[in-house]
Image (cartoon, helix red, strand yellow):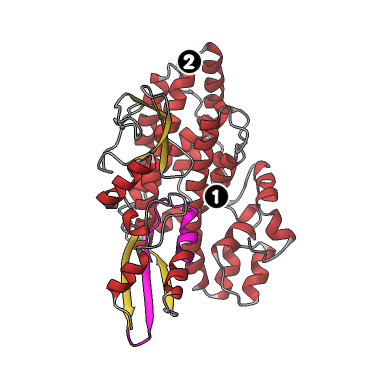
Amino acid sequence: MVSSEQIYHILSTVTDPEVPVLTILDLGIVRDVLVNEEEQLVQVYITPTYSGCPAMDVIAMQIKMALLGNGIKNIEVIHQISPAWTTDWMTEAGKVKLQQYGIAPPVQKSSHIMGLFEEPVVLCPRCNSINTQLVSQFGATSCKAQYRCLDCKEPFEHFKCH
Amino acid sequence: MADNALIIGHRLSEWCGHGPILEQDIALTNMSLDHLGQARSLYQYAADLYNTLPAEQKNILFTSTALQTKVSAAQALQEDDLAFLRDAWDFKNVLLVEQPNKDWAYTIARSFFYDAFNYLYYTALLKSNDATIVAIAQKSLKEVTYHLRWSSEWVIRLGDGTSQSHDKIQQAINDLWAFTGELFIPSAADEMALADGYGVAIDDLKTAWLKKVNAIITEATLQVPHATWMQQGGKVGTHSEHLGYVLAELQFMQRAYPNMQW
């Protein structure tokens, strides 16, 4: 039977369908891996980023496919909603990958609650300018906000703190 | 709670492709998705609990034929059954969330009143003695915080904007005000939940809600309505005619092609 370390290694090949540069380990959504020798069963606990995130069903399927591809047949992917996912669980390597991919990574601790019309300072992922402006708190996926850079004039996405 | 989330989520989804500008179209559908996700978690939990009830109690709780047919065939219910197989009288959402979108100002005012309530409600639910409810509340609260911020900013932007936007949002606030009282009137279910320790003293949230709503409306240079008469009925299944039209669209596929899957 495989070890949980080997399972984690396989999981490191599964990427977020919406942000393919991040693996699910970078995102911090894998909460636990249990290997039951007796029943030859592998259980993977994942936590949704946002309640309605449609990527979760795809990710669960991709986890099953990756494990099946490595000869593991008896798999359970369990959705665990507590404790609630936070961007604080994203790895530092993940943040660097996001930045290189053109998405500004989260910049604050998730517990920071902003006042009305307040914006965090987000660096432009292209030119590193701090002269950026929020266009909308809501973007192409639940986890991203839309920004524009006032120096290089390019629009960009920001993985918002959550 | 689940019905509130599903119906407001559906109302906001009606804006998809019709928003005044692309960014706000996307914002509304993002929030719609959050509400739908919350509804799914709550419905699944409700279905799990419902499945443990004795048969006679199941039939008292919901009387819709399509649901009862499934129950009498000894089939366990899933989240989708609760969303798609109940008729209007079995929905217990507040009247506020089923009110039509009408225009941008109405949509904003409706969301603002609801978001301010939802924020306080989920915050209070963190103290529930039911671990699943606490987990759903923790998750949802993060999302609802964004919603309330967005709708508060829009009330201020419209109220303190042009004379036309000012008048429109004032009109929407005045017209929808009568639907806000019901939020804080405990239903029999609310009282039972409170007595058993997993619910919230819903009438206690009113003071904090009024404080938040007053502050934003005042900052928006608008007037808080004086009207005190409040409409109610949603929590006992007595709905406005609007809900039937919402359900006709929402449930069409499942009613026309029973048990279909995407």
For label 2, the SS is loop
**Residue positioned 58% across, 31% down in the render:** B19
Provide residue B87's location: percent of width, then percent of height: 66, 56
Provide residue B217's location: percent of width, then percent of height: 42, 23
Determine whether, in the image, residue A140 is placed left or right of residue A38. Answer: right
Determine whether, in the image, residue A161 is placed left or right of residue B257. Answer: left
Q: Which residues are magenta?
A: A37-61
Chain on which label 2 sits: B
Disc marking residue B161 = 2
Residue A55 versus residue B76 in the image, above or below: above
**Residue positioned 69% across, 48% down in the render:** B249
Dividing the picture into quarters, in which one does residue B79 lie? bottom right
For label 1, the SS is helix
Dividing the picture into quarters, in which one does residue A75 lie? bottom left
The answer to whether residue B222 is magenta is no
Residue B184 versus residue A56 in the image, above or below: above
In the image shown, does B69 or B42 lie closer to the viewer? B42
Q: Amino acid at mark 2?
A: Gly
- Specify whether residue A134 is in view: yes
Q: Earlier in the sequence, mark 2 or mark 1?
A: 1
Residue B219 versus residue A135 in the image, above or below: above
CB under 8 Å between callouts 2 and 1?
Answer: no
Q: Amino acid at mark 1?
A: Leu
